[in-house]
Image (cartoon, grey):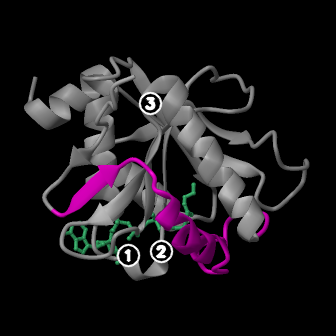
Amino acid sequence: MAHIDRTLRTPRLILRDWRDEDLAEFARINADPEVMRHFPARLDTSESDAVAARIRHHFEKHGYGFWAVERVGGEPFLGFVGLAHVDFEASFTPAVEIGWRLARSGWGYGYASEAAERALDFAFSEARLAEVVSFTALRNKRSAAVMERIGMSLHPEIRFDHPKLPKGHPLSPHWLYHIKKERWRKLKHGR
Ligand SMILES: CC(C)(COP(=O)(O)OP(=O)(O)OC[C@H]1O[C@@H](n2cnc3c(N)ncnc32)[C@H](O)[C@@H]1OP(=O)(O)O)[C@@H](O)C(=O)NCCC(=O)NCCS
């Protein structure tokens, strides 16, 4: 089968397919306590590799996923930003989420928002989705700030308890955001 180029570009970033060479840096990112502060646990190398394998499988199945993020003329792998089918059942699923995880060295430059805007464009044009959701533990202010920066707003349900975490776990309550195609078009193209 011919290779399909799923690379997306922004002024400063390349959103591309994953490579085996990304795995070592991804494992370092997933082992960083600051990056994983709002997750239940850091990941060891085999868990990190398993996440990357699931992401690659998602690309094969759906033609999009959490893209590997490369900086133009800079770091070959900063982490991921992209789209994924929500892998649990909740009142708002089935749904496609937008998500991000960058190395700490890549925070504070607007890279997550820049990549996420390109991914949203892809979601509403190439992938022809009608709506994209996003969610984050309540105390993950940086992640919620990305959602707001790219034009997402709180979903009518506002909050939910993440079904993969035990009831009462401090990370279980999540903000739920969303954006519909019409709002994106208005924000982006004024129509
Ligand atoms: C969530 C995460 C991706 C956000 O990263 P971030 O750098 O805060 O977000 P952005 O890339 O949008 O950058 C915004 C920051 O860059 C600054 N910035 C600098 N240059 C900029 C530019 N050209 N354009 C936009 N913002 C710019 C902004 O002012 C803002 O800084 P502030 O936080 O001091 O206000 C990052 O914290 C992360 O990977 N966290 C760990 C994983 C995680 O929690 N993922 C989400 C799970 S739900």
Residue ID at (9%, 31%): 189
Residue type pointed to by label 3: Val
Q: Nearer the viewer, mark 3 or mark 2?
A: 2
Q: Position of residue 104 (x, y in %)?
A: 47, 79
- Going from N to C along the chain, the mark reached first, 3 or 2, is 2
Residue 165, visible in the rendered structure: yes
Q: Quadrant of the C terminus?
A: top left
Structural crowding at the residue carrying mark 3, measured as other residues with C-alpha within 10 Å and reported as few (<14), some (14–19) or many (≥20): many
**Residue 11: x percent and y percent?**
13, 58
Identify the residue under disc 3. 132
Under mark 2, the amino acid is: Ala
- Left or right: where does residue 103 sit relative to residue 160? left
Q: Residue placed at 44% from the left, 30% from the top?
A: 132
Viewer-side residue, 171 vs 54: 54
Q: Which mark is residue 106?
A: 1
Residues tagged 3 and 2 counted as in contact (Cβ below 8 A): no
Rendered position, 170 above or below 64: below
Q: Specify whether tag 2 is near ligand 1 (CB below 8 Å).
A: yes
- Can you name the residue that lies furthest to the front here? 1
Boundaries of the magenta span:
12-41
Q: Residue at x 76, y 42 (%)?
A: 161
The N terminus is located in which quarter? Answer: top left
Quarter of the image holding residue 107? bottom left
Residue 88 is covered by the magenta coloring: no
Which dot marks residue 103? 2
Residue 119 in the image: state x and y as whole percent.
33, 41
From the viewer's side, name the closer residue of 55 and 147: 55
